[in-house]
Amino acid sequence: MITVIAAVAENNALGLGNQLLWHLPDDFKRFKNVTSGHYIIMGRKTFESFPKPLPNRTHVIITRQKKYTAENCIVVDSLQKAISVCPKDEEIFIIGGGEIYTQSIEIADKLDITRVHYTFEADTFFPEINLNKWKLTSVEFHPKDEKHLFDFTFETYLRK
C-alpha cells in the first residue's frame, strides 16, 4: 500500500522557504507513530529540511542530482525507482514535498492528511484532492489549545 501523508492548510499550503508553517505536536506524534518502522519516500529538499534522519525509518530520497549521497539512506532519481526499492508487501509512506506529492497522488492507495484550519502564505502546495477519485473514510477534529495554535483535523481518504 502506498500512503501519502501530509499536513496541509485550508488553502493546500505546505511550506514556505522549505520550512513548515506551523508546529502541531500531536501531528508530529501521529506522524512518528504511523511511519515508524516503515520506508518513507521524500524529495531531497524535504530530507534536507530535517535536522537529521528520522529514527526507525528507512529513508528513500528522490533527487535529480547525480552524485547526491546521504548516509544510511537510499538515493534514487524517480518516484518509480523509489517505490521499487521498497518491500512490496509493506505500507510505504510518501512524505513530501510538493512536487513528489503531485506525482504520487495519482498512484497512491491512501491519503493520510492533517488539515490545518488556517490559510497561510506559502511557496509549496499540496495538490487538490479530487473527491471523484477519493473517499473520505475517517475524520478526527482537534481544537486549538495551549500547545496547538490552530484547529486541525486528521483525515483519511481511500482511493475509490
Image (cartoon, helix red, strand yellow):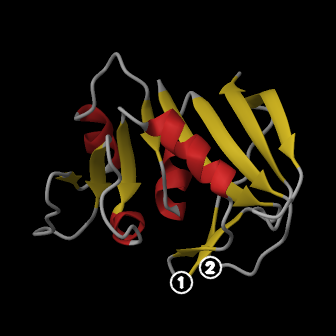
Which of the 4 image quadrants contains residue 56?
A: top left
Residue type highlighted by circle 1: Gly
From the viewer's side, name the closer residue of 76 and 140. Answer: 140
Disc number at residue 123?
2
Residue 17 shows which numbered tag?
A: 1
Question: Residue drawn 60% across and 41% down?
Answer: 30
- Disc 2 residue type? Asp
Q: Is residue 105 visible?
A: no
**Residue 38 as seen in the image, left or right of residue 152:** left
Is residue 46 shown left or right of residue 130? Answer: left
Give the image location of residue 26, x and y in percent. Answer: 67, 49
Of circles 2 and 1, the one toward us is 1
Mark closer to the chain start, 2 or 1: 1
Contact check, label 2 and label 1, Cβ < 8 Å: yes
Query: Distance from label 2 to label 1 (Cα)?
Result: 7 Å
Q: Which of the 4 image quadrants contains residue 22?
A: bottom right
Q: From the top left corner, tell me how far across and down residue 25 is, in percent.
A: 64, 56
